Amino acid sequence: MTLSNLSPQSITISWLTDNPTSTQLTFTTDQNFLQNLKSAKDDRDQNNAQSRNSHLVTLSDLQPNTNYYYKIGQPIFFNPSQQFSTPSQTTNSSFSPLVGSVINNQSEPVVEAQITLQVPNYFPLSTYTTSNGSFVLPLLPLYQQNDLSKVLDLSQNPDVLLTITKDNQVSKINLHLNNKLGTLPPIILGQNLDLTSLPVASTSNIPQPSPSPAFNFDVTGDGKINSLDLITVQNNLGKKKFNPKADINSDGVVDQKDLDLLKQALQTKPQ
């Protein structure tokens, strides 16, 4: 069980099962699990639910500084509950998203590989690869696990561990986080890389799977990037029929990743 992408309003919960099953998660603010129950589905199940071994659910529209309780599977009343708390403060991040791709030994894209960025003692960040093997991981604030009032200072360019997991294959990438790092070189699943000594200036000479995506954040088409664009994305979250412009990363769904990318663009927009 992994808790990641923690913010005052959202969190991502991911886990593995021995056999392919549907993703079933129920959460509430009621410690007794008797009222205000809400269900959530896998981020990848925007249209039809699928059975899978790896499960990833993003809970959004949460309340800051609040205790939540959740259960996985059915029937819920016989399953043990688990808990998380949301931080009270919102901390801005000026870092650009981490962009890369994952391939196998035959240079074929690896779909739905789990991407996890980890720093000891902090809540990790996570996402998964899309149908072309690429991923975009917004570098959101990392909250300390034992003290949610403390946030990792990304401007200090910390060393981080990027773990890529698919079935029984794992890659571990040691990385020196830098806001000018650019697109990572292609990652071959099952192989490890040490990129901590990679000079920033040399990244342009590394074979790249694709250029960094140019996202269109002007969702409303009014020539501005503002709260109206944010509202439009929020109104399209999880819908089967959605405004295509709200799908900022063009992965076929409007989800928390689109919302995070737009929030990041708003935070870094010149004033």
Image (cartoon, rainbow, N blue to C red):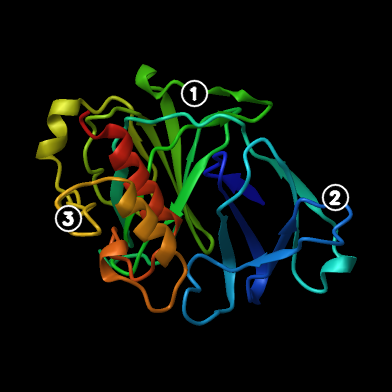
In the structure shown, which secondary structural element does the residue marked by tag 3 occupy? loop
Q: Amino acid at mark 1?
A: Leu
- Please indicate, yes or no, whether residue 14 appears anywhere in the rendered image: yes
Q: Residue at x 32, y 30 (%)?
A: 94
Q: Which mark is residue 152?
A: 1
Q: Say above or below: 25 vs 46.
A: above
Q: Say above or below: 5 vs 215.
A: above
Marks 2 and 3, how far apart at CA: 45 Å
Q: Quadrant of the C terminus?
A: top left
Q: Say above or below: 68 vs 244.
A: above
Q: Residues within 10 Å of mark 1 (few under 14, many from 20)?
A: some
From the viewer's perspective, tell me whether residue 157 is left or right of residue 163.
left
Which of disc 3 and disc 2 is earlier in sequence? 2
Q: Quadrant of residue 145?
A: top right
Q: Which mark is residue 119?
A: none
What residue is disc 3 on?
222
Q: Which mark is residue 31?
A: 2
Q: Nearer the viewer, mark 1 or mark 3?
A: 3
Q: Residues within 10 Å of mark 3 (few under 14, many from 20)?
A: few
Marks 1 and 3, how far apart at CA: 36 Å
Q: Say above or below: 124 vs 198.
A: below
Q: Residue at x 57, y 60 (%)?
A: 57
Number of callouts in the render?
A: 3
From the viewer's perspective, tell me whether residue 215 is left or right of residue 237.
left
Q: Quadrant of residue 159?
A: top left
Which of disc 3 and disc 1 is earlier in sequence? 1
Q: Amino acid at mark 2?
A: Gln
Q: Residue at x 57, y 39 (%)?
A: 8
Give x and y (percent) for residue 56: 56, 60
